[in-house]
Amino acid sequence: MEGPPSFRPRTQLLSRILLWLWSQIALASILVLCAQKGLLDTPQDLALTALTPSINRLRELGDWAGDWARALWRRPSLVEENEALRREVERLKAQLAAQTDARERLQELELVLDLRSRLENQIVAAKVIASHQTPHSKVISIDKGEEDGLREGMTVLTPQGSLLGRVKQVLPHHSWVLLITDPRSAVNVAVQTSPQDSTMGIVLGQAQGLPTIDMVPQDTPIERGQLVVTSGLGGRFPPGILVGTVKAVERRPQDVFAKAWLEPAAQMNNLHTVAVLVSFIPPDLSRPP
Amino acid sequence: MKRGALLVLLLLAVPVVSPTLAQHMRLWNVYPNLALILTASWLFVWGQGEGMILASVAGIMADMVGEGPLGVSVIGLIPTVLLGTLRELRIMEATFPIAIVTVGLGTLGYELSLVMVRNILGEGIRWGDAILWGGIPALAVNLMAFLPAYALLLLLKPLVAPARQSPKLGR
């Protein structure tokens, strides 16, 4: 007679799985709740501090191997690119020579107004530890945190000064930066349609492809190649920071707004150093004044 | 002892390799989920019991360097371990097809769990985008990364845990 004995292993397996499932959900819930309350910030910060040297070494190794692989793969196009870059350097040198005089005058004025020292104090340079870029999350972690003066919401720039994103979460010695390409990111921008005129829009990160510029009226003369800078509306980012250029525009008669795509000025895939604008703290709009 | 050392080494590799070398293995904008691959490979090489414990530790290790709240990956790895029980039920003799199904569906389960938890926390991730641009490419990438990882563990198995000699019967 086949009866209960043959079912016993399956019953045992089922009860073991249920017990494990319950404990797993309980463990995860406790961890998520503690993390939300900030109770795990210090252990996480310590773990990151301990792992950072190994991460940095592997990152350098990966970059080196990646560069070699790319160089081998793209050898023919690199020759053309090299030629184009040489021409570009020549053009920029000529431009630089013409601007030297103006720069000297600007330096004199900065010295008089003590602007330089004030500007230098506004920025904290940070090293990128890790990059996590998946379709629904595009963030980087940096080696500066609360003890270096960083706060949630602060603006993060590339060393060249274009917009990268904002500080999402701060630990004592590390922070996470939400990039402008992340689907959760929204930046109020002004598209410079002419030297005297600009139009407002919102840059939204996408799960796939380039960020879009939304809420641009159909009749606006927005075109490929126009500069996009932060507008300062909403108070989340200071105005006038370069975000990128218009990559493409689509106008459909049935739509109220034109749709445009942004080519970010910052290279998101190869970041090593970033600058955090510590002097600009965005207002907390979630709470009443 | 050797197996324990290997496990510790692989667990330490999860938070270090994920944001560095794994980023260079990016395909369709996604990179291999090392915590999931390690859990699934270990589960099919050394059994479900060890896979169950490993899922919790690997999940926490992965979240250590991730931006999501700590514990999200622990939930994300639940479907992989649950699907791994198909092997224990012995619905078919061959392990490999079950392993492939486990990694594929486990990846989709991981991505959906991640989006669910993040949406509960108010992050507003779109389900359609997450499945189309996240889940499906991740399924293919994880399967591609799982095959060498599983083969490597199978090769290492006799080295780190030699089979016990059966007792000699008779004289």
Image: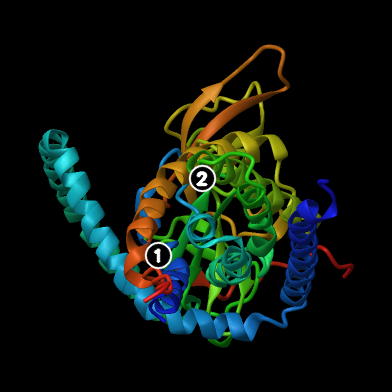
The secondary structure type at the circle numbered 2 is loop
- Using residue A272 as the reference point, say whether residue A276 is left or right of it: right
- Mark 2 and 1 residues: CB-CB less than 8 Å, in contact? no
Q: Is residue A8 above or below residue B143?
A: below
- Using residue A29 as the reference point, say whether residue A107 is left or right of it: left
Residue A81 appears in which quarter of the rendering?
A: top left
- What amino acid is at disc 2? Thr
| Residue that protrudes farthest toward the top in the picture | A253
Subunit of mark 2?
Answer: B
| Residue A100 image point, x, y percent | 21, 60
Mark 1 lies on residue: B17
Which residue is painted at 54% across and 66% down in the image? Answer: B62
| Residue A3 image point, x, y percent | 84, 49
| Residue A181 image point, x, y percent | 54, 47
Front-most of residues B6 and A32: B6
- Residue B37 visible in rendering: yes
Q: Is residue A253 above or below residue B120?
A: above
Front-most of residues A251 and A36: A36
Mark 2 lies on residue: B95
The secondary structure type at the circle numbered 1 is helix
